[in-house]
C-alpha cells in the first residue's frame, strides 16, 4: 500500500524542503507558489485522482456482469495519469485495479504483456489493450461498452 503513495510523498517532502529553504533565504514571496505546484504534483501522482480501486477478481466479476472495461493502473505512471485525465468523468464507468495493491491484477497484466507490468492495460470484452488511446476508450465508455 505504501508503494502507491511513495511518489506523492517524495514530491510533498521535496516541496516542503524547498519552500522551507526559500523562506529561510528570505524569498518568502515565491514560496506559496512553489508549495502549490508541489502539492498539485503530489496529488496528481497519488491514488486520489483515480476512481476507487477494486481487486482484479472483483473487477472481472463486475465487468462480466455489466460489460464495462477493466483498467489496470499504478500510481506514478504518466501514461495512467494521461489516460485518467483525458477520460474525465467517464473514467468512473470503468473498473480500476491498482496493480501495486493487487498481486492478481499485476499477474493479469504480466500475462498479456510478455511478463512486463505495462500499464495502463485495459480489458474490454475479454481482450487486452495496452496503453490504449484515451479517445478510443472514452468513446467505448460513453457508448456503454
Image (cartoon, rainbow, N blue to C red):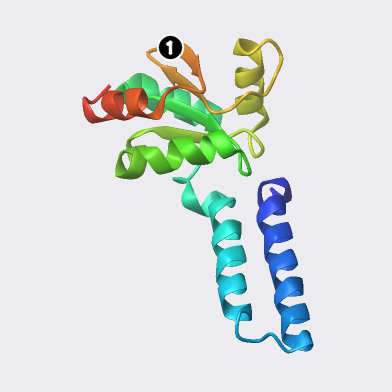
Please count the marks in the image: 1
**Where residue 84 sits in the image (x, y, percent)?**
44, 40
Tag 1 residue = 126
* Res 70 quadrant in image: top left
15 vs 26, nearest the viewer? 26
Would you say 99 lies left or right of 18 here? left
**Left or right: 91, with 101 as reference point:** left
Q: Where is residue 56 in the image (x, y as percent from the top left)?
A: 54, 28
Residue 10 seen from this side: yes
Mark yes or no: residue 54 visible: no
Q: Give the quarter of the figure containing the C terminus.
A: top left
In the picture shown, does residue 69 fall above or below 76? above
Which residue is at the front of the view, 56 or 69?
69
Q: Residue furthest left?
A: 143
Residue at the image position 57 percent from the left and 65 percent from the top = 37
In the picture shown, does residue 17 fall above or below 91? below
Instruction: Indicate the position of residue 93 as horizontal and vertical percent values.
Output: 32, 36
The crowding category of the residue bearing disc 1, from other C-alpha atoms within 10 Å (few below 14, some 14 to 19, many at least 20), is: few
* In this rendering, position of residue 68 left or right of residue 33: left
- Residue drawn 69% across the image and 59% down it: 11
To which quarter of the image does residue 43 belong? Answer: bottom right
- Seen at 55% across and 34% down, the residue is 79
Q: Which residue is drawn at 35% across and 25% down?
A: 137
Tell me the element at label 1.
loop
Location of residue 90 in the rendering, given as x and y in whole percent from the top left corner: 31, 39
Q: In this view, does 128 lie to the left or right of 125?
A: right
Amino acid at each position: 500500500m505504501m508503494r502507491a503513495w511513495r511518489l506523492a510523498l517524495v514530491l510533498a517532502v521535496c516541496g516542503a524542503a524547498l519552500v522551507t529553504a526559500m523562506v529561510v533565504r528570505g524569498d518568502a514571496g515565491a514560496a506559496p507558489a512553489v508549495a502549490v505546484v508541489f502539492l498539485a504534483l503530489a496529488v496528481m501522482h497519488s491514488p486520489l485522482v483515480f476512481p476507487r480501486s477494486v481487486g482484479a477478481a472483483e473487477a472481472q466479476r463486475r465487468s462480466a456482469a455489466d460489460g464495462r472495461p477493466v483498467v489496470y493502473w499504478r500510481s506514478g505512471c504518466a501514461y495512467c495519469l494521461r489516460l485518467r485525465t483525458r477520460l474525465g468523468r467517464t473514467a468512473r464507468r470503468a473498473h480500476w485495479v491498482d496493480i501495486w495493491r493487487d498481486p492478481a491484477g499485476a499477474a493479469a497484466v504480466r500475462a498479456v504483456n510478455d511478463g512486463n507490468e505495462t500499464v495502463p492495460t485495459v480489458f474490454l470484452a475479454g481482450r487486452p489493450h495496452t496503453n490504449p488511446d484515451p479517445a478510443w476508450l472514452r468513446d467505448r465508455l460513453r457508448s456503454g461498452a
